[in-house]
């Protein structure tokens, strides 16, 4: 049995979800004034680095796509209940992805920053590290400090939606082989 367009769509979207987890999902931009003038230093974190929920969501979606594809290639038709569970798993992963995001407009939600007595060789990096604590992500925007989602998040989220849509369109049967007499 060969691969049809449905199997190809599930494969490509599942691999895109996995690859997107290495992209920057979270960003901290800090305005820095130094001897060279004023510039913005931006620090990024991937899904793997920033969130257990994002990591789980990526693995769930990739696993659902891989399981559907392997089942189709080895056994042919995927039973309807299994297909429904795989779609539900993708829906749960999308929820986990969105649930990790917290927005805050208050400085009180800022992380605790420890000050050292000696000079900090990278004060902007220290500030960024304080805002990039795994599983404690709060979006924040002010003059000189912007914390929030990066473009990799939207790539991964879109890939998750595409994987769910691909699985839904492919159905339990995938590409049907024509009857032979």
Image (cartoon, rainbow, N blue to C red):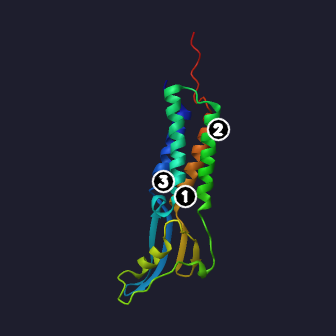
Question: Given contact means CB atoms under 8 Å apart, are the residues at marks 1 and 3 in contact?
Answer: no
Please, is residue 157 above or below residue 34 in the view?
above
Q: Nearer the viewer, residue 23 or 118?
A: 118
> Which residue does the image show at 56% across and 13% down from the upper left?
180
Q: Nearer the viewer, mark 1 or mark 3?
A: 1
Q: Name the residue carrying label 1.
A: 53
Q: Residues within 10 Å of mark 1 (few under 14, many from 20)?
A: some
Residue at the far top in the pictured view: 181
Q: Residue at x 49, y 27 (%)?
A: 74
N-term-proximal mark, 3 vs 2: 3
Residue where numbered disc 3 is placed? 20
Task: Give the x, y percent position of residue 66.
Answer: 50, 39
- Could you tell which of marks 1 and 3 lies nearer the N-terminus? 3
* Alpha carbon separation for disc pair 3 and 2: 25 Å
Q: Which residue is mark 2?
A: 84
**Figure quadrant of the C terminus:** top right
Viewer can see residue 86 = yes
Separation of residues labelled 1 and 3 (CA atoms): 15 Å
Q: Quadrant of residue 88?
A: top right
The quarter of the displayed image where residue 95 is located: bottom right
Q: Is residue 48 above or below residue 132?
A: above
Residue 100 in percent (x, y) is at 58, 62
């Amino acid at each position: 049995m060969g691969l049809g367009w449905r199997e190809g769509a599930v494969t490509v979207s599942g691999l895109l979800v996995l690859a997107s987890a290495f992209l920057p999902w979270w960003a901290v931009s800090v305005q820095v004034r130094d001897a060279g003038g004023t510039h913005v230093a931006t620090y990024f974190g991937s899904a793997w680095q920033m969130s257990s929920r994002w990591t789980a969501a990526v693995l769930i979606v990739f696993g659902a796509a891989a399981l559907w594809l392997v089942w189709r290639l080895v056994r042919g038709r995927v039973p309807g209940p299994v297909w429904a569970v795989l779609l539900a798993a993708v829906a749960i992963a999308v929820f986990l992805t969105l649930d990790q995001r917290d927005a805050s407009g208050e400085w009180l939600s800022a992380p605790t920053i420890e000050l050292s007595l000696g000079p900090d060789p990278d004060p902007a990096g220290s500030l960024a590290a304080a805002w990039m604590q795994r599983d404690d992500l709060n979006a924040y925007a002010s003059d000189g400090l912007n914390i929030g989602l990066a473009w990799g998040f939207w790539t991964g989220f879109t890939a998750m939606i595409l994987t769910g849509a691909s699985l839904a369109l492919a159905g339990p049967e995938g590409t049907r082989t024509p009857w032979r007499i």
